[in-house]
Image: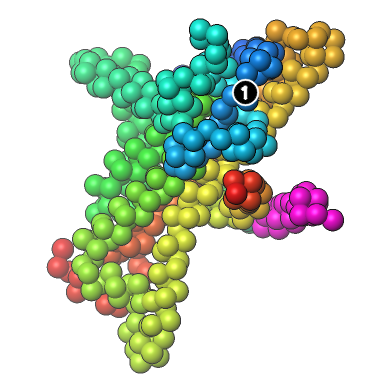
Amino acid sequence: MDMFTAAAFAYPIGLGLAAIGAGLGLGKAVSSAMEAMGRQPEAAGKIQTGMIIGAAFIEALAIYALISPFIAQIVFLKK
Amino acid sequence: MIECMRGLRPLVGHRTLVLVALVLAAFLGFSQATFAAAEETHGAAAESHAAPAAKHGESAVEGVVKEAEGDIHAAEHEEATEKPELPNLISVLLKMNVGGKPLAHTPVGHFMHVFEVQIFMVLITVISAVFIFGTLRLRMMVPGKLQVFLEMMVEGFYNFFGGILGSRGKKYVPFVASLFMFIWLNNMFGLLPLMTGATGAYETTVTLAVIVFFYVQINGIREAGLWHWFHHLMGSPNDAVTWALAPFMLVLETIGELAKPLSLSLRLFGNMMGEHILSGVFLVLGVMVMGIVWPNPLVGVPLHTPFLLLGLLVGTIQALVFSLLSTIYLMLLLPHDDHGHGHEGEHGHAAAH
């Protein structure tokens, strides 16, 4: 198997794994935030802000997996 | 921002808003599909009798030197690395023939290709600046809808970012609000036909992140003083154990500080580029689907329209997240007396203010 075939198999699998992790994390974060908002609707704004920040951090992990193929593509193909 | 949305709600009914958004998205999708089809058929014709035209997908930094040489291998590799994106004014123009040869091979075309994203960035900034200054100039006794809207936005920014930064951080609100406006406008303009946003290019996001990094560090030093800033960077040691750990904490915190601009820029870039590629792929797919029943189609099926609606959401959220995280990085380095984080060494400093 040459390098490109290996990469073609590895990237989707890696992205899928990253998506699983990010999905689990986001699900947990958002469900907790929703629960908290349900318990304390008057604090909904603050909870939402915190949730968005946390979601951005979690989501960034999946985004790294998404853009690493493109960076690798640029790095390897520009030689 | 949220306050301003809440204020707008009674003005515009939900159903009308959704309807307008759907009609707008359908129109945008349709017109973009038209341009994509034109680009596909026209581009194929242009490339058949000329060398492969210069394409985008090259970073402007190294592109300037590399492309000037114009060797065949680079062009071939570029062909392979080209990302499917929505057609914009420059990419359409570059495919056109001027006096027998493609515009991409002329000096003007070369300049437009290298600085493609930056041209749009300047355009968007000028448009929004003219709009905002034009509205500010009015100063009517009975303000119009536009002025009320802008004032509501400014007030919303002050409430939202000022609420996080605390009473002494109010003077930093214009910076983060400008960040939000710049990113948001770029994201929104990127959805219009024949336009593209500058946030989909890594040059732009890394510049923004580096600006935020230096702004935050310099203001952190200026507000807290050099020693307190360094103390914070060592993990705020106050007894023997934490002082012993301070060198390790210093390394750790320094890496943490340096990782912030990296993650900030990669997040925005990844989101916007992912969205551009997603809609670009579906746009090309739509043209191909139309090609089954109509060879060399003039319009494509606007299959990417749902992703434009998604782009509306993602663009707003990412603009919010970028400016919100900048605000929080700023807040973490400012001496926080009214947040009750329990830093022992800062009471004297807080009393001095």
Mark 1, residue position = B51
Q: Which chain carries label 1?
A: B
What type is the residue that disc 1 sits on? Ala
x, y percentage for residue B237?
34, 82
User: To which quarter of the image does residue B119 belong?
Assistant: top left
The residue carrying pointer 1 sits among few (fewer than 14), some (14 to 19) or many (20 or more) residues within 10 Å by Cα, namely: few
Q: Residue at x 38, y 23 (%)?
A: B123
- Left of B265 or right of it: where is B36? right
- Left of B215 or right of it: where is A58? right
Q: Residue at x 16, y 63 (%)?
A: B353
Question: For this rendering, which residue is in front, B124 or B143?
Answer: B124
Question: For this rendering, which residue is in front, B53 or B234?
Answer: B53
Q: Residue at x 35, y 72 (%)?
A: B233
Question: For this rendering, which residue is in front, B169 or A77?
Answer: A77
Vertical comparison of B71 with B97: above or below? below
User: To which quarter of the image does residue B185 belong?
Assistant: top left
Vertical comparison of A54 with B250: above or below? above
Is residue B248 visible to us here? yes
- Left of B310 or right of it: where is B104? left
What span is in magenta?
Answer: A1-28
User: To which quarter of the image does residue B42 belong?
Assistant: top right
x, y percentage for residue B6?
46, 31
The residue most toward the left is: B352
Is residue A46 visible to us here? no
